[in-house]
Image (spheres, helix red, strand yellow):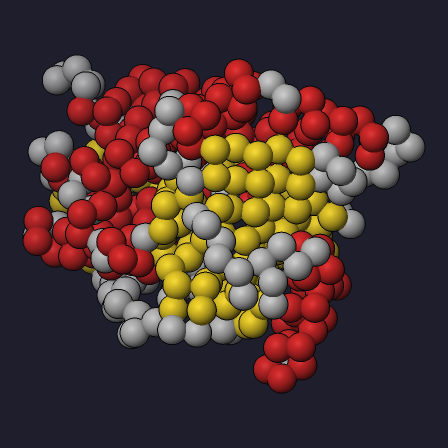
């Protein structure tokens, strides 16, 4: 195999990168285990959902992906309520920034399904294998295939085999927390509002989802310490059905009324990670390049920002330079540096602010939230930042 660019990894960031570059006229191939994300039947939903920002929605629309997804499974977010651990509260509304919506809640599997379909239509070559070794300009797969390219793009997740094989620097901090996710039926309508609470060093979020025949629906994302996560994940179905809604409503104070678990509970470890984003002949995107705390719901948006910028940089390179030229790739690195750093600082800083119990901190952080609530121009800046604009 020989191509101009080979994308290693076939998650959302990897497939979006391959599709964007293909549409830009680049000879691209994918190297990853080939799996098709089938549509969920009836009123079942994929366990992992994402809050898609305005900038990410525009990118997916430009790739023809947004319109290819089932629109009835996409829920717009028109407002967001953020509650502190005392009386602090910030309410953000789309109308405050003259926007139709703040974000959209979309299932990961639905995005993957549409991307897979588009790649099939474009006939993008797909090597159904995994990376075993890398050297400049060439990879070898576990199946013994050798593939050559000017540039290898690592979109192969937080444990990126390409990043490791290319000996690219990587920093990782364990939070000692897990993110618990499932879907809930709620008694009261969510009114297309996302809710978030900072309580007892934990971060709880309810994300609006489509109603079902069982009632109104929200997706749960709950950041808790490892011990608490293990306790809930080890419960049998009947025990979880009683204990989880009780624990959630203790935090949410019955905001959405009675809650009922309607899907399996999943957990994933939370980390703060940053990698060297480029080397000669290698560039990283998505979780391979960085991971942030999910409290702002911006992890995938950060990855899709990588896809957009890398595609632009490669498309605009000088004709005499190769796609793997380090001087070209450094333009991508420089362009993304500020946004990645800002998101790292914002998410980790907010997490640390509510995780610490120094005497004056509870008063200060809640007073700060109440001040923001009184300043419309600050809210507009927060909305613009979340939108990626």
Please report the residue visible at 13 percent of the width from the left and 39 percent of the height from the top. Answer: 22
Relative depth, front residue between 260 and 310: 260
Residue 118 in picture, x, y percent from top left = 14, 51
Res 16 visible: yes
Image quadrant containing the C terminus? top left
Residue 360 in picture, x, y percent from top left = 88, 28
Kindly indicate the quadrant of the structure image that contains residue 54.
Answer: top left
Name the side, left or right, on which 383 lies relative to 64: right
Name the side, left or right, on which 270 lies relative to 98: right
Relative depth, front residue between 88 and 37: 88
Residue 354 in picture, x, y percent from top left = 74, 38
Please report the residue visible at 17 percent of the width from the left and 52 percent of the height from the top. Answer: 68
Please report the residue visible at 49 percent of the width from the left and 73 percent of the height from the top. Answer: 262
Residue 135 in picture, x, y percent from top left = 33, 41
Name the side, left or right, on which 286 lies relative to 36: right
Q: Is residue 366 above or below residue 146?
A: above
Kindly indicate the quadrant of the structure image that contains residue 305.
Answer: top left
Please report the residue visible at 56 percent of the width from the left and 47 percent of the height from the top. Answer: 195
Kindly give the residue lying farthest to the right in the view shown. Answer: 359
Res 125 visible: no
Relative depth, front residue between 346 and 246: 246
The total of numbered circles placed on residues is 0
């Amino acid at each position: 195999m020989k191509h101009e660019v080979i994308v290693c990894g076939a998650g959302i960031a990897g497939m979006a990168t391959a599709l964007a570059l293909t549409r830009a006229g680049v000879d691209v191939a994918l190297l990853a285990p080939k799996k098709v994300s089938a549509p969920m039947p009836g009123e079942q939903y994929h366990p992992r959902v994402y809050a898609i920002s305005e900038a990410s929605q525009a990118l997916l629309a430009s790739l023809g992906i947004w319109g290819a997804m089932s629109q009835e499974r996409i829920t717009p977010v028109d407002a967001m309520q953020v509650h502190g651990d005392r009386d602090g509260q910030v309410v953000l509304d789309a109308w405050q920034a003259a926007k139709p919506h703040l974000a959209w809640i979309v299932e990961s599997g639905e995005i993957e399904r549409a991307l897979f379909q588009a790649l099939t239509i474009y006939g993008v070559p797909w090597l159904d294998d995994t990376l075993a070794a890398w050297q400049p300009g060439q990879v070898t797969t576990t199946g013994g295939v050798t593939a050559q390219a000017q540039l290898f793009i690592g979109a192969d997740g937080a444990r990126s085999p390409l990043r490791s094989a290319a000996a690219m620097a990587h920093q990782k901090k364990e939070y000692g927390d897990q993110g618990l996710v499932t879907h809930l039926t709620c008694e009261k309508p969510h009114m297309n509002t996302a809710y978030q609470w900072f309580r007892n060093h934990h971060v709880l979020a309810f994300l609006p989802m489509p109603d079902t025949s069982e009632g109104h629906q929200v997706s749960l994302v709950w950041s808790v310490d490892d011990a608490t996560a293990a306790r809930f994940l080890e419960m049998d179905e009947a025990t979880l059905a009683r204990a989880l809604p009780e624990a959630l409503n203790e935090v949410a104070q019955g905001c959405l009324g009675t809650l009922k678990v309607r899907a399996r509970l999943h957990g994933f470890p939370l980390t703060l990670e940053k990698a060297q984003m480029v080397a000669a002949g290698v560039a990283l995107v998505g979780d391979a390049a960085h991971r942030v705390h999910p409290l702002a719901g911006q992890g995938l948006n950060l990855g899709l920002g990588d896809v957009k910028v890398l595609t632009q940089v490669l498309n605009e390179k000088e004709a005499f330079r190769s796609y793997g030229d380090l001087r070209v790739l450094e333009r991508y690195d420089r362009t993304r540096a500020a946004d990645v750093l800002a998101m790292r600082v914002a998410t980790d800083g907010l997490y640390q602010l509510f995780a610490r119990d120094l005497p004056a901190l509870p008063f200060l952080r809640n007073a700060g939230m109440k001040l923001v609530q009184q300043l419309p121009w600050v809210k507009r800046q927060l909305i613009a930042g979340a939108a990626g604009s």
